[in-house]
């Protein structure tokens, strides 16, 4: 896969990241090796991602299902591959749940909250907003603080998917496309 913006050398990216306060671990990732060309933006993106990854209200599992569904529905192989690993090994989301976001409506293990959140992702990808019907479902399941975080997660990782696909950011070393089976969206 080619990239529209050349990746910064890892050491150059780490140096640029340290100048603006982007964590070193992020600077090593291909996405940040791309966006660190614009240091102020990369700092803002880093802060937003780290805020949402802390999961103060929205459970980690739900956030990861959101990210995986966005990656799947938008065809963002980088987002899928990166969060395949993060969801399982950091946040202990079962592999079956992650695979199920491909065709979530037929997965009996998803509960009411899972389904409402995945409907919200699908609405957002399809309509650019969450429909009144789905919002009504979400509002009965989550408080206002969690709803804001949920909308922020959907919006943020939709934006990240756009960045990744538009800049044609390559997978990080060692990642394979569409884990675990190499099957991507049609």
Image (tube, grey):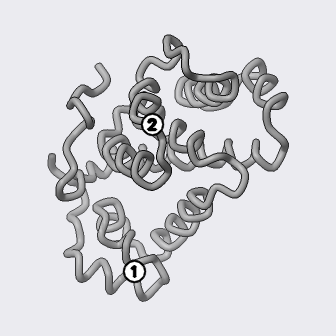
State which quarter of the image contains the C terminus: top left
* Residue at the spot 35% in from the left edge and 49% down from the top edge: 85
Viewer-proximal residue, 161 or 138?
138
* Residue at the spot 44% in from the left edge and 24% down from the top edge: 100
Q: Position of residue 13 (x, y in %)?
A: 30, 77
> How far is disc 1 from disc 2 in space, using C-alphas?
33 Å
**Can you see residue 164?**
no
Between marks 1 and 2 in the image, the one whose residue lies nearer the viewer: 2
Where is mark 1, residue-wise? Answer: 17
Is 51 above or below relative to 17? above
Bin the neighbour count of mark 1 within 10 Å (Cα to Cα): few under 14, some 14-19, many 20 and up.
many
Which quarter of the figure has residue 7? bottom left
SS category of the residue bearing label 1: helix
SS category of the residue bearing label 2: loop
Which quarter of the figure has residue 150? top right
* Residue at the spot 19% in from the left edge and 75% down from the top edge: 9
Where is mark 2, residue-wise? Answer: 94
Residue 22 in the figure: left or right of residue 14: right
Mark 1 and mark 2 in contact? Answer it, CB < 8 Å.
no
């Amino acid at each position: 896969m080619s990239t529209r913006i050349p990746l910064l050398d890892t050491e150059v990216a780490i140096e640029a990241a340290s100048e603006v306060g982007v964590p070193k671990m992020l600077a090593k990732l291909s996405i940040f090796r791309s966006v660190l060309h614009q240091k102020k933006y990369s700092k803002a993106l880093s802060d937003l991602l780290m805020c949402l990854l802390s999961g103060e209200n929205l459970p980690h599992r739900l956030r990861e299902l959101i990210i995986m569904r966005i990656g799947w529905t938008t065809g963002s192989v980088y987002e899928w591959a990166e969060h395949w690993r993060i969801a399982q090994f950091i946040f202990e989301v079962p592999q079956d749940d992650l695979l199920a976001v491909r065709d979530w409506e037929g997965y009996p293990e998803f509960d009411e909250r899972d389904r409402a959140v995945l409907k919200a992702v699908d609405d957002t990808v399809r309509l650019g907003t969450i429909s009144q019907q789905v919002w009504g479902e979400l509002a009965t399941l989550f408080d206002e603080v969690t709803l804001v975080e949920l909308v922020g997660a959907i919006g943020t990782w939709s934006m990240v998917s756009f960045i990744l696909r538009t800049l044609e950011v390559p997978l990080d070393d060692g990642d394979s496309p569409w884990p675990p089976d190499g099957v991507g969206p049609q």
